[in-house]
Amino acid sequence: MSAPVVIVGGSLAGLRSAEGIRRAGYKGPIKVIGNEPYLPYNRPPLSKELLSGSGDIDEIYFPIKESVADIEWVLGQAATSLDTKEQKVTDLSGTSHSYSALVIATGLRPKPLPVNSNGISGVHVLRTFDDAVALRKQLLPGVKVVILGAGFIGCEVAATAIKAGCQVKVVARAHEPMEEALGKTLAKEVKRRHELKGVEFVKGASVFGLIGDGHVQRIILDSGVIYDADLVVVA
Ligand SMILES: Cc1cc2nc3c(=O)[nH]c(=O)nc-3n(C[C@H](O)[C@H](O)[C@H](O)COP(=O)(O)OP(=O)(O)OC[C@H]3O[C@@H](n4cnc5c(N)ncnc54)[C@H](O)[C@@H]3O)c2cc1C
């Protein structure tokens, strides 16, 4: 039997690639290597319904079409090296996977905190189901949340956090929230609506450092301003 088509990255692009390969007439084996422990799921709800509710992963899985029901899933394993001469991918466990063709569908990673956190906890990103579950547990009434970044994810987290009764500040280097994506007029309206609910926008600043005794207690901005913070979201 010929080596499978191997797809690295078990999310939307990985799944759609497999479906596309089948549509193009390939009938051989397909193997997907994904570093998350889940089958492909829909990420948009992570910053919306799933962040505010109690939803579980089952509710956001993509349906698996019959054409790709025979995929071999290798989940919870990051691909760590690639040998293009030998046509082999090796995963974190050291297992080698030969391929006849390779698709790399590894998406993006969130930008990390742009300063050293010195091991202080309470800093979150939002990319995976596990990130969303970890964050929503912390969005409790009265919690002081500082969100770095006023793009889609920053604004969505702000809206969810304020609904949960948190005190929310959104810190961004420039522009109105989501201005690059939506343009000035809509961005102003997004800002107005968020502010109406109690979200505070801090423009023209970024993080300089964190203060905390194990867990974050304050955030220092590069403008010199210091805010209390129980939770920092890097968005
Ligand atoms: C919180 C959130 C909200 C969003 N909301 C919206 C929205 O409202 N509307 C919209 O259009 N889009 C939204 N998006 C964007 C959308 O989810 C992405 O465009 C989409 O997930 C991209 O799919 P992808 O398969 O290319 O990458 P990803 O979904 O990032 O998947 C890549 C996968 O590859 C895995 N991987 C990475 N490296 C390796 C490795 N070495 N080995 C094995 N696996 C690896 C990753 O863990 C991940 O599972 C949102 C994204 C997030 C995070």
Image: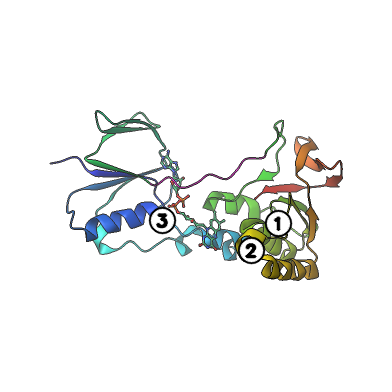
* Alpha carbon separation for disc pair 1 and 3: 28 Å
Q: Is residue 153 visible?
A: yes
Percent x, y of residue 186 = 67, 70
Q: Is mark 3 within 8 Å of ligand 1?
A: yes
Residues rendered magenta in the picture: 105-113
On the image, numbered disc 3 is attached to which residue? 12
Return the x and y of residue 138 as percentages of the image width and height.
69, 52
Q: Residue at x 84, y 47 (%)?
A: 228
Residue lying farthest to the front in this orientation = 184
Q: x%, y% of residue 205?
A: 78, 47
Q: Are marks 1 and 2 in contact (CB under 8 Å)?
A: yes
**Residue linked to disc 2:** 52
Judge whether residue 109 is colored magenta.
yes
Compared to residue 143, the image places residue 215 above or below, namely above
Secondary structure category for the residue under label 1:
loop
Circle 3 Cα neighbour tier, 10 Å, few/some/many (<14 / 14–19 / ≥20): some
* Quadrant in which residue 6 is drawn: top left
